[in-house]
Amino acid sequence: MKNIQKFQAPRGSLYLPGGATGVLLVHSLGGSPLELKFIAQSLARQGHTVYCPVVPGLTFGTDVSGLSTWRDWYDAVESAFDELSSMCDTVLIGGASAGATLALRLASFRQDDVAGIMLFAPTLSVNGWAIPNTLKLFHLVSDKWTARLFSFRTPAPFGIKDERVRNFALEALRGDGSTPSDITVRGGGTVFEFFRLVRNVRPLLSKITAHTLIFHPRHDDQSDIKNTMTLQRKLSGMVEVCVLDDSYHLVTLDRQRNYVADRSMDFITRVLARLGVKPMVEAPKRATETKSQQMQGNGAAE
């Protein structure tokens, strides 16, 4: 087994060494490991080893030409999973938006290796209330050469309800020489490959038996909650759903990120208990969050 402390993650990845339980987190289409940093740090404080890899082609700024394919993305995710599995006894996977779709594909082929799944606003259809109807016409494009002639700008509010957090996130996700407007653009070739990925994954959903936790905003601006309802119907394992009332698409960054982190930690603890694995560290309850839950119910419904 490889040494957890000595592993060198690729540049731009987020790697937090911990105990023998590993968590692989995959970011969204055109996103960055930074969007999962808060969740990753929360899980690391619980004693887990957390890895949020850069995925060439999926990560912002890694596929300017739009030539990467969804299979390239998947191969990178599977390779990261194998790296983590070589260091950890038990591994769970999670993904945000398109990253959730990649996580589901991995779970369908590696059922004996995936202990549990966490999905943050999973996306099979890009159909949120802020998505323009013109995107639907893109489904008529049948070849990647034509697809690369298009580009799509993510409309405001860019998946984040909290304006302060939104401005901070846009600044943090900036690449060298990039502007916030660049960050919100997705190349047509990349979107085309995502649609291909979804078509590949849909028939595999019924094969997935791992215990799954899903977070989805009730008013998701990019991915309607019907995406999660589809997964509830199709997945063959136990599925828990947390509906968020005060967040938009990027639930790991938005107003209810503390709730998402705590429920994720609780989920991992329960999965490990079922497997007979004792967690290294019991994360303390945040006093401020407990007070918020008592006053507001934290805006979540199940």
Image (cartoon, rainbow, N blue to C red):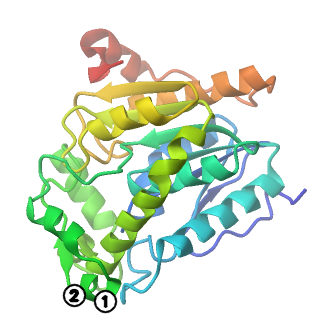
How far apart, in angstroms, are the residues tagged by discs 2 and 1?
Answer: 7 Å
For numbered disc 2, what is the local secondary structure? loop
If the image is split into quadrants, where does the C terminus sit?
A: top left
Foreground pick, 107 / 91: 107
Q: Position of residue 287 (x, y in %)?
A: 43, 19
Task: Decide: is 214 above or below 6.
Answer: above
Residue sitting at x 14%, y 56%:
131
In the rendered structure, the answer to whether residue 97 lies left or right of residue 275 reads left
Residue sitting at x 55%, y 75%:
72
Q: Position of residue 172 (x, y in %)?
A: 33, 64
For disc 1, the marked residue is 145
- Can residue 134 be seen here? The reply is yes
The numbered dot on residue 184 is: none
For numbered disc 1, what is the local secondary structure? helix
Residue sitting at x 69%, y 41%:
48
Q: Check disc 2 and give the amino acid type.
A: Leu
- Can residue 256 be seen here? The reply is no
Foreground pick, 100 / 167: 100
The numbered dot on residue 149 is: 2
Q: What is the crowding at mark 1: few (fewer than 14 residues within 10 Å), some, or many (at least 20)?
A: some
In the rendered structure, the answer to whether residue 112 lies left or right of residue 145 reads right
Q: Position of residue 3 (x, y in %)?
A: 86, 59
Task: Decide: is 254 above or below 24.
Answer: above
Give the number of callouts. Answer: 2
Residues tagged 2 and 1 counted as in contact (Cβ below 8 A): yes
In the rendered structure, the answer to whether residue 220 lies left or right of residue 13 reads left
Foreground pick, 251 / 283: 251
Q: Check disc 1 and give the amino acid type.
A: Trp
